């Protein structure tokens, strides 16, 4: 059984042009907004990081339909501006596509690094909020917020810190309002919406 799994598959539309994110070992990485439609018609507005070399043959990018395979990554923002935990999709494969159906699929396997927080909606539906630590190479890990509903939430709500958890779902964006010095401000949260839990041996698509 694989102890770690981090696979993201997206198909949708670039919502803007890329801008430089960072450089690593002489390679330039760029970040761009990406929109994926849900069946409901709403969109998940995500951010994707890719190399300048991957993006060069696809420019101009805005409005172009893309298929992306990669991983969900987290970054601890210490600037004091915006969210403390920045979530992005790191593209390993990035190609233009003519397929019209959007796709948003993720599989993760990692370890719970905080106790799950279980709550209920006003109508009584169970919700479980989790933080999953997914290891990657060189001793680093991504800390990924996840949310489950209903029966899945009841199961995950009984887990403890250190328990291994495999799951499948989608990467979603969610707008919420936060009071800053008494003034409401809209913020965007990025999290994994859990569809179901993975059994042993289900990590490979």
Image (cartoon, rainbow, N blue to C red):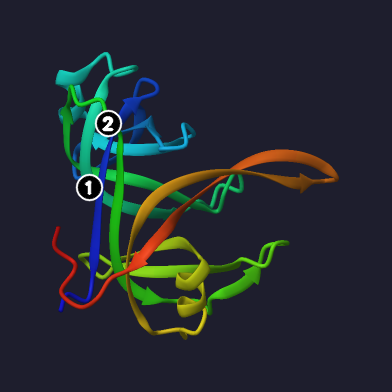
Percent from the top left, x then y, of residue 31?
A: 35, 33
Classify 10 Å Cα crowding around label 1: few (below 14), some (14-19), many (20 and above): many
In the rendered image, which quarter is residue 204 located in? bottom left
Quadrant of image for the C terminus = bottom left
Q: Residue 175 in the image: state x and y as whole percent.
A: 60, 41
The residue positioned 40% from the left and 55% from the top of the image is 74
**Residue 149: horizontal and vertical position, in percent?**
51, 64
Q: How far, Cα to Cα, is label 1 from label 2? A: 19 Å
Residue drawn at (23%, 16%) of the image: 59
Give the answer, above or below, for where 157 lies relative to 19.
below
Q: Quadrant of residue 94?
A: top left
View extreme (top): residue: 60
Residues at marks 1 and 2 touching, judged by CB atoms closer than 8 Å? no
Q: Is residue 187 left or right of residue 5?
A: right
Which residue is tagged 1?
70
Picture coordinates of residue 166, whole percent (x, y): 30, 71
Q: Which residue is mark 2?
A: 101
Residue 82 in the figure: left or right of residue 181: left
Helix, strand or loop at mark 2: loop
Task: Report the front residue among 165 and 94.
Answer: 165
Helix, strand or loop status at disc 1 = strand
- Label whose residue precedes the other's in the sequence (1 or 2): 1
Q: Say which of 125 and 82 sits in front.
A: 125
Q: Quadrant of the N terminus?
A: bottom left
The residue at the point 22 percent across, 76 percent down is 3
């Amino acid at each position: 059984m694989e102890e770690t799994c981090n696979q993201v598959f997206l198909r949708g539309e670039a919502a803007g042009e890329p801008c430089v994110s960072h450089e690593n070992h002489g390679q330039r990485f760029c970040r761009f907004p990406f929109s994926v439609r849900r069946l409901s018609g709403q969109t998940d507005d995500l951010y994707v990081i890719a190399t300048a070399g991957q993006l060069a043959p696809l420019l101009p990018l805005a409005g172009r339909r893309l298929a992306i395979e990669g991983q969900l990554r987290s970054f601890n923002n210490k600037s004091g501006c915006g969210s403390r935990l920045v979530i992005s999709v790191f593209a390993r494969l990035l190609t233009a596509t003519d397929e019209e159906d959007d796709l948003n699929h993720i599989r993760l396997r990692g370890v719970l690094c905080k106790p799950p927080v279980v709550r209920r909606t006003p109508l009584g539906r169970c919700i479980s909020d989790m933080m999953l630590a997914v290891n990657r190479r060189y001793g680093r890990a991504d800390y990924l917020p996840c949310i489950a509903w209903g029966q899945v939430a009841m199961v995950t709500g009984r887990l403890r810190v250190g328990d291994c958890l495999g799951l499948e779902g989608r990467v979603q964006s969610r707008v919420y309002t936060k009071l800053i010095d008494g003034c409401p401000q809209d913020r965007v949260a990025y999290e994994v919406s859990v569809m179901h839990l993975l059994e042993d041996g289900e990590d490979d698509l």
